[in-house]
Image (spheres, rainbow, N blue to C red):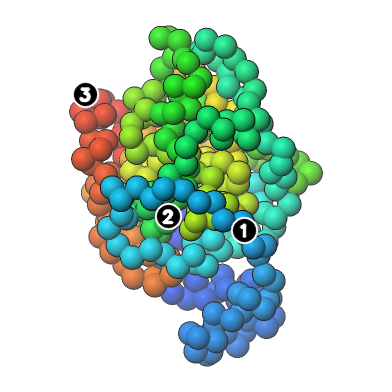
Amino acid sequence: MRIIHRPDWTISEARVTPEAVALARRTLLGGAGAALAIRPAAAQLSWFGTAKPLPARPPLPARHDPQFTGGRPLTPEEAAITYNNFYEFGTDKNIAWAAQTLPVSPWNIEIAGLVAKPRTIALEDLLKQESLEERIYRHRCVEAWAMTVPWTGFPLAALVKLADPLSSARYLRFTTLADRKAMPGLEQPWYPWPYIEGVTMAEATNELAFLSLGMYGKIIPKQDGAPIRLTLPWKYGFKSAKSIVKVEFVEKRPVGFWQQVQGNEYGFWANVNPAVPHPRWSQAQERLLGTNEMVPTQIWNGYGKYVAELYAGLKNERLFM
Ligand SMILES: Nc1nc2c(c(=O)[nH]1)N[C@H]1C(S)=C(S)[C@@H](COP(=O)(O)O)O[C@H]1N2
Ligand SMILES: [Mo]
């Protein structure tokens, strides 16, 4: 028997409204939130400080790369870091508090598969070898919400170089943390844990592909994938795997978490394209977190100048799902 468990977001985000955000906030507040809808915006801001504050994050200084501006106003930090997809902590958007149990230190990354020397690196040792920079990127979730965020990290290409892959390596396969003690979402056994994602070698070494350790000039929040996550701004957000523990160089195309859950809706490539609808909703527009403004979606999420050529020869692939 095959049971298809559709995550609630695959239905709900298609009809997202400002009310949905109000509802999310109300949930954060518990019962006290019922009055929220009639409170002025300024008063709404204070709930964040008073209800259940998220831990303060230490600064993570880095050189800002002026090449990546985001092209639209930054999403307010509070909006970006309290509206998350991180199924290991639950299937709704307000998992920020639940995610504080994520154990981030010590953190090791296993480099495995088709590389000169498979090994495990402590994150702090990896960071000694990479220099951090800040880039503002647009993020587009397949559910049609979007944000614009300053990420701090280093190019994925630098990790590929350090890993020293063999010429037979064709893909990178990322495995993320699956810790039953810390992650209540793993109790939902119908999901194919751990969360896996993958990219081609050409994608991994593209200038845009980034590993993020910070957000808004500070250490990345746990709910956003601490201590290290992928940031692939031209692809739907589910490709940007959080809390990575293993990077494997492989010959076979990896099958991602969402592809396993619902392969007819979520594929390997998942490049953003307004003209290719999701089977159950349009991708023509996106809702900006923070303002709820609806704006047109751009092909490759606006990053065609960097990545379109990667796909020029791939005529028989489902590039946009
Ligand atoms: N391990 C893991 N990584 C994940 C997810 C997840 O559920 N688990 N969700 C993905 C999805 S669908 C999106 S849109 C982004 C959301 O990142 P954010 O919460 O920082 O906005 O993370 C991606 N990476
Ligand atoms: Mo997403």
Assign a secondary structure to mark 2: strand
Location of the N terminus (image quadrant): top right
Q: Is residue 17 visible?
A: no
Q: In which quarter of the view is residue 98 placed?
A: bottom right
User: Which label is found at residue 313?
Assistant: 3
Using the numbered discs, state the Cα–Cα distance from disc 1 to disc 2 in whole angstroms.
15 Å
* Disc 1 to disc 2: CB gap under 8 Å: no
Q: Residue furthest right?
A: 181
- x and y percent of residue 218 in the render? 54, 55
User: Does 65 appear above or below 288?
Assistant: above
Residue designated by label 2:
150
Residue designated by label 1:
57
Q: Amino acid at mark 2?
A: Pro
- x and y percent of residue 123 in the render? 62, 34
Side (left or right) of 269 relative to 132: left
Assign a secondary structure to mark 3: loop
Using the numbered discs, state the Cα–Cα distance from disc 1 to disc 3 in whole angstroms.
44 Å
